[in-house]
Image (cartoon, rainbow, N blue to C red):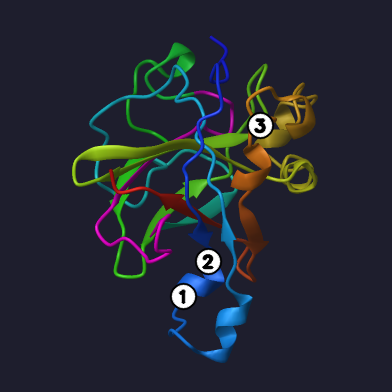
Amino acid sequence: MLERPLTRRAWLGGAALTALGIAGLKPGAPEAASVSCILTPEQTEGPYYIAGEKLRRNITDGRPGAPMQLRAFVVDATTCRPIKNAAVDIWHADAGGVYSGFGAGASNRTFMRGIQRTNAKGLALFRTVYPGWYQGRTVHIHVKVHVGGNVVHTGQLYFSDTLTDAVYRRAPYSSRPNRNTRNANDGIFRNGGSRSLLSVKKNSAGLYVATITMGVRRS
């Protein structure tokens, strides 16, 4: 089943701090000039959501793939202040392009799915793997943000095609060559995806560290 873009654009009417800005700047500090605010686009939930996912940091269930840490910051789109105790809910395909609970992954409803609460800096951390691709979509991670029991953001997170090409040259991704959809020709990415690109770095241990900041309204 292919995902469809929203029939109209739904934008959160506010702004978000960059991850650098959230990490500890004080009001009035000279470094404040480095803080920028961005609009955060809403995007379709897609057909693979499962409610009531587990509260956990490691969502791999031991499945193979390039190890990745996802650092998701949540801020108030009106004030740009970090939101503590927001529930960040993510799900994505495994290295083989399979979702748990559906199709070839129907026998397992937990791999590559989980929820984490944000800390005082608005940060939720996940241990996962670089997502695989499936027909008709560019590489992505689904996300919902819950504040006070309400869903305040539904979106998708993306990777640069250059990075994905590099990751996919190695096993287990290299066993599935010729992915057919890149960012530029993905209908959902074109509806605001460039504003939801992850900033990714690879550390000395070979871990991909992917960071995003999401501005949301509390209600």
Q: Position of residue 144 (x, y in %)?
A: 38, 38
Q: Position of residue 33 (x, y in %)?
A: 61, 80
Categorize mark 1 by other alpha carbons within 10 Å: few (<14), some (14-19), many (20+): some
Judged left or right of residue 174, residue 9 is: left
> Is disc 2 in contact with disc 1, using a CB cutoff of under 8 Å?
yes
- Which residue is at a point 58% across and 72% down the rendered structure image? 35
Q: Amino acid at mark 3?
A: Phe
Q: Position of residue 69 (x, y in %)?
A: 50, 56
Judged left or right of residue 3, residue 218 is: left
Frontmost residue, 36 versus 21: 36
For label 3, the residue is 189
Q: Amino acid at mark 2?
A: Ala
Judged left or right of residue 98, residue 24 is: left
Categorize mark 2 by other alpha carbons within 10 Å: few (<14), some (14-19), many (20+): many
**Magenta segment:** 75-98
Distance from Cα at disc 2 to Cα at disc 1: 6 Å
Name the secondary structure under disc 3. loop
Say above or below: 25 vs 186. Answer: below
Name the secondary structure under disc 2. helix
Q: Which mark is residue 19?
A: 2
For label 1, the residue is 23
Among the two numbered marks 3 and 1 on one chain, the one whose residue lies closer to the N terminus: 1
Q: Amino acid at mark 1?
A: Ala
Categorize mark 3 by other alpha carbons within 10 Å: few (<14), some (14-19), many (20+): many
